[in-house]
Image (cartoon, coloured by chain):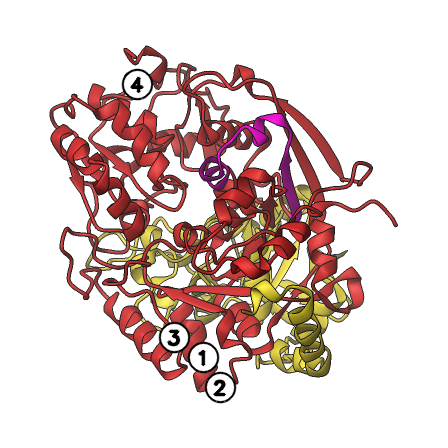
Amino acid sequence: MNTPWIDHSGIVAPMMDDNINTDAIIPSREMKRVSKKGLADGLFANQRYLDTQRDPNPDFILNQAPFTKATILLFGANAGCGSSREHAVWALKDFGIRAVVAESFASIFQANCIANGILPIALPRDQVRAMAQWVEVDPAAHHVAIRLEQKTIGFDGREIPFEIADNPRRMLLNGVSPIDETLVFRKEIDGFFNQDRARRPWLYS
Amino acid sequence: MMPRTLFEKIRDLHVVSKLEDGAHLIAIDRIMLHERTGSIALSNMLDDGRELLRPEAVFSTIDHIVDTAPGRPSTTRMPGGQVFVDEMRRTTKTLGLGLFDVDDSRQGIVHVIAPEQGIALPGITMVCPDSHTCTLGALGALAWGIGSTECEHALATGTLRLPQYGQIRFSLTGQRPEWIGPKDIILHLIAKFGAGFGKDHVIEFAGPAVADLSIEERLTLCNMGVEFGAFTVIIAPDEKTIEYVAGRANAPRPADQDAAVAHWKTLASDRDAKFDLDLTIDVSSISPTVSWGTSADQSIAIDADLPTPESDQPDLLRAIDYMGLTAGAPLLGMPIDGAFIGSCTNSRLSDLQRAANILKGRKLAAGVRGICVPGSTAVKLAAEAEGLDLIFKAAGFEWQEAGCAMCFYAGGETFAPKSRVVSSTNRSFEGRQGPGVRTHITSPETVAWSAICGEIADLRKFPS
């Protein structure tokens, strides 16, 4: 069960590279516990720290004020590609990220975001770029405002509509558990497997 | 009846309920788990007091962070890794699930053992919290990678929600040249179309050049589907598939074989089935292909020059810089420090056989560290039975126990920063094989030949 996703306005960190992969979001060695919590420290560890002593790299955006308090990230195309590791999303969530805006998303990462209450918003390249340019003028004051009910994202006095399928939107808005939602179909699920046992016996013997 | 694609036929067979948005709730036949992500799914299920709906559908192994040193212990040297191994052992025991542990002959990389043990079968739906689950589409299974939370859903409900996806068919035609294998073909395609090309699509590989591939070669082709951005990849089962599957541990018993085969023979896209994109690619002009950069689409023919990025291509400029290369220069002849043969892409018996053919009677170039990690304990034993280990070792390669090993870096063993490594793996991301390591992904034959030459080398010059 996630916290219901309510309208959000926050500091945006533009990280506009294409193909930002989940290894970069959290390197494998930072997956230190069998838990979804306490992973913020490992977020972007390869870029965020200068050495094994974990001195912050001053050139990395999330180490620079006001981006240390970013709640929205801007990525390029194919965001979250690579490994299926959900730790990437748990680390983003633990850091305080509420939404990722990108030109496009890798499928597993997008599903992982929704499952963990992070809103993935896909926008055309020129709109992501325009948003980044506006943010960069005054990152502390230029907050982007996201309204999930209305499916709009606001910046620079504009309200841009975005697309999100009804089901993920509803799940984010209500914070519902997908497992409980599916178990409503328990009778149909049992029915399927009972029938299938006769149809494809080789999978059941 | 409307003509249907292979994907639609398998999906339709598994529909539990039609949902809004054109999505379907579909039954999941088999679930595979490994310790890195599966342990979390199982722990959370137990913590939430959920019931495991179909324990008989779950298969578990440990592969990602196991020690692969010869004669390994049951512990791992990956810092922070032991907790995942321990938790996998604890949760599978608590739930009464079997586990292919390090001392089990069925142990190995999840996508190598799934076909080997007959867990992946034509026409089934199958998931694993691992992005390379698309590998198993090579057998005509609808198989895809998920996150740990989606895995909990599959474990607890026996189902997953399948959104509406588009469909792309690649028909591969033409005679592939000598030395050209599935790794060259898929790297060529990803470079040509882009790493995000398959986004929100199922890709079907078809055509005579696919029919010509062995099952193990098809597994390599499909393995890289996720590097193409695809939801998953699939190939219709044929006689080769039926023959490959027959008699494996979890394949149909003899009494069910005829019924299973009759069903599998229906699993092909109908002649008039509609694809959103239907592309034909001639493989006869593909060269040995190698990645130069930090994304799989940054790959070129081995004798081509590196690109010359414009100033508005920061990704390419950064990749050239990270990889220590010069824009516009040739890649061929770049000195290498390491050679790795392993991973769910290219660590099967036929991969090791092809690499051994190159290595036989030859020695690694001075200063090159060569490592071979078979994909499964069964592959390792089969390779040793035909003496491949002796060829690798005589050439100067380290010969290890089965596992994912140095396909990625988890804080344990790695190559030195800035070392240049030719690798039969699937990813060349920054730091993927260790901090600062420069990985060039390519076929196992090109890895072996480059290791002998001490530089990135063209197989077509191999003195056969």
Numbered range of the magenta stretch = B200-220
Q: For the residue marked with disc 4, what is the amino acid?
A: Ala
| The chain coloured red in the image | B
Q: Residues within 10 Å of mark 3 (few under 14, many from 20)?
A: some
Nearer-N-terminus badge (4/1): 1
As drawn, the label of residue A35 is: 3
Q: Tell me where residue B445 sits by quadrant.
A: top left
Question: For the residues marked 3 and 1, what is the alpha-carbon distance in whole angstroms?
Answer: 8 Å
Q: Tell me if residue A111 can be seen.
A: yes
Question: For the residues marked 4 and 3, what is the alpha-carbon distance in whole angstroms?
Answer: 44 Å
Query: Which secondary structure, mark 2?
Result: loop
Q: Badge 1 is on which residue?
A: B44
Marks 4/3 same chain = no
Q: Badge 2 is on which residue?
A: B48
Question: For the residues marked 2 and 1, what is the alpha-carbon distance in whole angstroms?
Answer: 6 Å
For the C terminus of chain A, the quadrant is bottom right
A162 drawn magenta = no
Query: Which secondary structure, mark 4?
Result: loop
| The chain coloured yellow in the image | A
What is the chain identity of the residue bearing mark 1?
A: B
Please state which of the two labelled residues, at mark 3 or mark 1, is closer to the viewer. Answer: 1
Marks 3/2 same chain = no
Query: Quick one: B202 or B250, which is closer to the camera?
Result: B250
Query: Quick one: B240 or A146, which is closer to the camera?
Result: B240
Asked if residue B258 is positioned above or below residue A202 in the image, the reply reads above
Q: Residues within 10 Å of mark 1 (few under 14, many from 20)?
A: some
Query: Which secondary structure, mark 3?
Result: loop
Whether label 3 touches label 2, CB < 8 Å: no
